[in-house]
Image: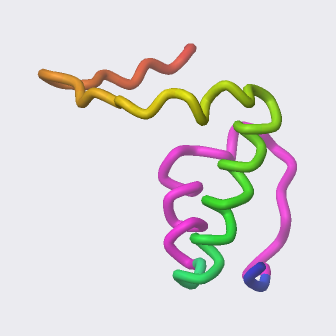
Amino acid sequence: MGTVSGPISHDPAEETPEAKARWFGSLSVEERMDLLCEFTDLALDAQPSLVNHRHAQSTSGRIRVLEQA
């Protein structure tokens, strides 16, 4: 993976969606694709039946992201 630029923090308060987006944006295309493959493998390990779901449907309308306060 990419190199770390700056100090490493273990404070969950610093893990904002914006910070995560900046980190993800700092990765190369190859690193992003590696992560996608790793996440896919993780999901399939947890629920192998996902490969049987071939007819995904798009959502109509808007999607709202909720965060716990």
Q: Residue at x 13, y 22 (%)?
A: 61
| Quarter where residue 49 is shown | top right
Q: Residue at x 27, y 25 (%)?
A: 63
Q: Quadrant of the C terminus?
A: top right
Q: Residue at x 39, y 25 (%)?
A: 65
Q: Is residue 60 above or below residue 16?
A: above
Residue 67 position, x and y percent, is 50, 20
Write down the region rendered in magenta: 4-26
Pick whichever, 51 or 44, lies toward us: 51
Q: Is residue 7 above or below residue 55?
A: below
**Numbered label tally:** 0
| Quarter where residue 44 is shown | top right
Q: Is residue 65 above or below residue 41?
A: above
Residue 41 position, x and y percent, is 74, 49
Pick whichever, 47 or 29, lies toward us: 47
Pick whichever, 2 or 11, lies toward us: 2
Q: Quadrant of the N terminus?
A: bottom right
Q: Is residue 32 above or below residue 64?
A: below
Q: Residue at x 85, y 65 (%)?
A: 8
Q: Using residue 34 as the reference point, say whether residue 24 is left or right of it.
A: left
Q: Using residue 9 as the reference point, say whether residue 26 is left or right of it.
A: left
